[in-house]
Image (cartoon, rainbow, N blue to C red):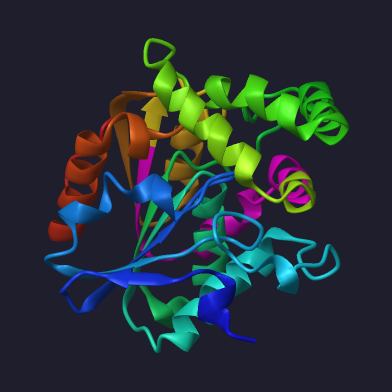
Amino acid sequence: MDVLKRNNVKIIGRGKTPLLFAHGYGCDQNMWRFITPAFTNDYQVILFDHVGFGQSDVSDYSPAKYCSLQAYADDVLEICEALSLEEVIYVGHSVSAMLGVLAAIKAPKLFQKIVLIAPSPRYINEPGYTGGFAESDILSLLESLDSNYLTWSGAMAPVIMGNADRPELGAELVSSFCRSNEEVARNFAHLTFRSDNRADLKKLVKKTLILQCQEDVIAPLEVGHYMHHHLPESTLVVMQATGHCPNLSAPAETIQAIKDFLTHDHYLVNH
């Protein structure tokens, strides 16, 4: 198995410290195109596509193998091993934020710092916890996705993106969703929206940045504060950006927050 081919791994940049970017659900590495140029002078920037998305090799996919989020986190570890990486700085968006948490728990010596963009450890509301969705909402969402993935993508992607005054952003996300392998996308959605990684947060003992967007229907403000409270060495920055994809909608703000975190051990927590 060629791990680098499987995940369509690309390496750019002139620095030595590895900066690994992991895209969110239904996306691919192209979603980082506004972010990565700001880091190529100082870092070894590494991009990849999750199996079933972008230009990845889907021939290695099976529902039995990819039956948990940990399986996707293990792919991240395999990429790092194939490239002989050390002191990795991991940047994960949406569900890939939690994949980074799982990977760093399993191989803590591999990672230096973690950046979590619009993360959520649990999407379903429970007593004492606000995830953003009632369980019935998640079941309806998944039933709709299973019945007609393309229709679901056209309806949900603009909602996820937010920023209704910039419809081109929602259109890009629709297009990305529709390019994904449907079987993988359906199964990955079930893993994502039914996941519960709250108990894992306390196991991550790494300097971690949480970038929380405002008015994010997927990961509301309460989720960001919950994660900050439960991640031992975390910094929470509540961005001016709205929606779930600040890497596309607010790249300059996203870049600045990441750079501040990487160049300063501690800076003001924004509540």
The C terminus lies in which quarter of the figure? top left
Nearer-the-camera pick, 8 or 38: 8
Give the x, y percent position of residue 162: 46, 20
Quadrant of the image occupied by residue 43: bottom left
* Vertical comparison of 93 with 99: above or below: above
In the image, 218: left or right of 17? right
Q: Tell me: 38 left or right of 169.
A: left
Percent across and percent down for residue 93 are 46, 47
Check if residue 209 falls in the magenta segment. yes
- Residue visible at 53% across and 46% down? 27
Q: In which quarter of the image is the N terminus?
A: bottom right
Query: Does residue 83 lie above or below 162 as drawn?
Result: below
Give the number of marks: 0
Q: Is residue 239 magenta?
A: no
- Is 164 situated above or below 250? above
Q: Residue at x 20, y 79 (%)?
A: 16
Q: Residue furthest top?
A: 165
| Residue 167 point in image, percent of width and height | 43, 16
Horizontal and vertical percent position of residue 68: 75, 61
Would residue 182 appear left or right of 88 to someone viewing this image?
right
Would you say residue 266 is visible in this rendering? Answer: no
Residue 41 visible at all: yes
Tell me where the magenta segment starts and ends, as one range: 187-211
Q: In percent of the image, x 49 and y 48: which residue is there?
A: 230
Please tell me whether residue 113 is drawn above or below residue 191 in the rendered image. Answer: below
- Residue at 22% over, 45% down: 255
